[in-house]
Amino acid sequence: MTTLPEVPGVPVGAPPLAVDADEAPVRGLWRQGVSVFCENRLALVGLGLFILLAGVCFLGPLVYHTDQVHTDLAAVHLGPGEQGHPLGTDGVGYDQLGRLMLGGQTSIVVGLAAGILATFLGTLWGAVAGFAGGWVDSAMMRVVDAMMSIPSLFLFMLLAAIVTPSVPMLILIIGAFAWLGPARLVRGEALSLRSREYIQAMRAMGGTGGRAVRRHIVPNAIGTVIVNATFQVADAILYVAYLSFLGLGVPPPAANWGGMLSDGLADTYSGHWWLLYPPGIAIILIVLAFNFMGDGLRDAFEVRLRRR
Amino acid sequence: MSAPIEFTVRHDEAARDAGENEPLLRLRNLHTDIALRRGTVHALDDVNLEVRPGETLGIVGESGSGKTMTALSVMGLLPSGGSVVGGQILFEGRDLRSLPTDEVRRIRGVRMGMVFQDPLTSLNPTMRIGTQVAEPLRVHEGAGKAQARERAIEILRRVGMPRPDRIVDNYPHELSGGMRQRVAIAMALICSPRLLIADEPTTALDVTTQRQILELLDDLREEFGMAVILVTHDLGVIAGRADRVAVMYAGRVVETAATAELFRSPRHRYTEALMEALPEMAVREPGVPERLYSIPGLPPDLSRPPAGCRFAPRCRFGTDECRTTEVTLSTGGHQHACLHPVALTTAAPAARTAPVSAPAVDASGPAPEPILSVRGLVKDYEATTGGLLRRTTGRVSAVAGVSFEVRPGETFGLVGESGCGKSTVGRLVVGLEQPTDGQIVLDGTDIARLPRRERRRMHRQVQLMFQDSYAAMNPRMRVDAILSEPLEIQQVGDTAARRARIGTLLDQVGLSRRVLERYPHEFSGGQLQRIGLARSLALQPRLIVGDEPVSALDVSIQAQVLNLMRDLQRELGLAYVFISHDLSVVDYMADRIGVMYLGKLVEVGPAYDVVRSARHPYTQALLDAVPSATPDLAAPRESVTIRGELPSALNPPTGCRFRTRCPLAQEICETEPPLAGAAHQVACHFPLRQEGGAEA
């Protein structure tokens, strides 16, 4: 590290300069962002919905005790309200409301974790490829194309045959395939961002490519990334359902909304609607909640909307 | 001084015509509002204007003054949320605001025509030229296809398009900027309008093209006998072309007068200040820099316009009375809305002193070692086919053997039209591009050959300043992060030292500490340019390359930035490479000027000599094309004019690259002329003057 030449009147290493007399307190970045987020009504609705659903799933079982381990074949397919089961029971006698809470835990945890993992990987990959350009970009994006061209179903089955499904494994497997979408998206964004003049200005100061990606490309692609992340979370929740449907999800007695939905499908024609609608509605609500929040977050990250 | 008299005669004629003819267009107490999400902008406030048949009215003003809004109000093309809320628009005696919509649409479509600033975006890229030009005919006159095509060819011929019968079948992207603007004009004229509104018709064009287009507008006005409203920010464009001028400020007309009279003796203090802020008005002896007058502050926010005279807060002569009383336009031929107008002068304006002799060469010892010396710089871009396996199909010769030197504390101006390679030279010097060949010697080391790591350290010595500072700043970074970025990259000092350095920088460019917590979008253009300059200075460079640093700014703000750049140069001993297309700005700023044409330097010399006794025909043509705000200089001159278009750099002419457009070209010009001369060099076989100013 080199030192700065002496500046007249301002000794090096002096304490931060005295603040201007006219300096009014400026609201912190964080608080400004929060206030922009709060201006978006739908975002608040989304946030409320998410807190509600997560609260019910994670705190509900503390109040509402059910047995989700032992099957009770004496109480299968009970309708809502019968024998103290507010939402009835399923084909093996589990309490549907309790199961919804338990399944929600898996779905929310896997969805969030896998969505974030996929977004993180994809953003990094896409930003580097788009910024580097040339043959690096070509090579990196061909990898993405190649992976996209293989049906994910085939890969999932292959992987599930190799590893035993568990929650962390599900997160890894879904994350490992879902990053392709965000990678393409961010690469497109980075391609247009790298020709911006502020990147050139940084290079004229002697800045490196790594800095450009870290400080300039990723932060400016964040709007796209955040909105996409909410879709990723929603997708991941559906992926879990998908895998469970194939019998590759978390093994019973663990549950998830997607699995419950696919089980409920079998009961479509037997009139057991309480096995179909509650998990379906729960999935729709959580996906909506994430999409609304995504909108609000994008606005909150958009500095141009900030006012003082 | 015969020119001003001629102007007076023209003015008298115009006045006589006015007695006979009713005004073609009359705006009476026009009010236009634009409703935004937060509040309403009162874009026009009580605008009164008149245009007589066959007359050119110039509307001049800075951005946000309402000049474009006036034009758009007349044409009914206001942006969304905009509406005319009061007053009358009388066209041929009928108020457009009270007529039925269909009729107004016909009047606007047939009797009026409009030409926009950017010919690239005002033409539909998917429509053939002929179809596009004839569209108004088909809409308003129901002309058939064949007839429309015939009329399109005819009108294209009249706007000076070469081979109009072939051009009708072309698409806009196949034409150059000047040609596209001719198409836009043809489109506006096809229904033979009585009034043509040209909104900054030449702002996006090069000076030599600008001259051609303005001359065309003049000719067409006479030929069609129509009136023209010329809206522009450029006083020079107005001075040469308009019969009368209206000066606008903050949504109001502050002064109207006959052109010659206005430029000879402006009455309103704003007009006066605007003219003093022009770089070309800084009458300058060689080596004696004079500060430009700069108007302090910013134009008012028109959603909450101030009471009284709107210019009062920025006016040198503003009094309390100005800030409280509404000032209306005075009556008579020369109207102004000022309580303390400039005294009437009858004297001719102080014209630029003609060069008597070459200035004495600086005799203060031997010249210091150059800080930057560029030798034989070449940059070719390979034109390739797309795809993974790129095949080279040709070479674009952007820079072809450019050599110059910059000494410490000196400003070297690089002038040329778009596509001449001046920006590429700038990018090569700061290391954003790798030269194909040649040397860039900075302080004795050839930086083009340095390994990457060392070149990164070299960046401390040379910094770049951008035309559009907003685009050159990450919109997500606050000003403190923007200013500390160069220090972080070069690992200078610790956090406290960086903070201290940023404080000093802000003091140097005259900004308060408050700006640190703000984002780039919260600043005006002039403030952003100051922040950009502060960032360039952060590493204490010895050389700053400014790529059109003031081209996007209004005249009054431009003067502030130019003054600041000069002050800092004097304080810090900086050297500048000042790249601009604007000769008057370069003339004001630079000690020495290099003129570029198609990748080559055609003339290099002391600024005073190059501008006042040019030796290369291209330089002379460029100088003649620059519209001057001094009417007697703006009057038609016998001069070198160049016609035609810039040849493609993909296949540049052999020998002297200017020879295809040069009026003096002969056979020998097919061999390349060397850059010859001592202090004032020129690359021409037939220079206009000997070194020292004597006519050749």
Image (cartoon, rainbow, N blue to C red):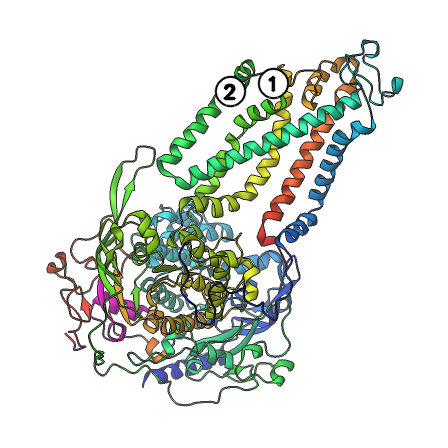
Q: Is residue B567 left or right of residue A103?
A: left
In this view, which residue lies farthest toward the top?
A: A73
Q: Quadrant of residue B254?
A: bottom right
Query: Which is nearer the eye, A288 or B267?
Result: A288
Query: What amino acid type is highlighted by mark number 1?
Result: Pro
Q: Residue at x 57, y 65 (%)?
A: B514
- Report x, y in % for residue B279: 38, 74
Label number found at residue A165: 1
Q: Which residue is mark 2?
A: A151
* Label 1 to label 2: alpha-carbon separation: 20 Å
| CA neighbours of label 2 inside 10 A, class few (<14), some (14 to 19), many (20+) | few
Image quadrant holding the N terminus of chain A, namely bottom left
Residue B675 within the segment the image draws in magenta: no
Q: Residue at x 13, y 56 (%)?
A: B670
- Report x, y in % for residue A166: 62, 20
Above or below, B134 relative to B54: above
Image quadrant holding the C terminus of chain A, namely bottom right
Q: Is residue B475 left or right of residue B260?
A: right
Residue B616 within the segment the image draws in magenta: yes
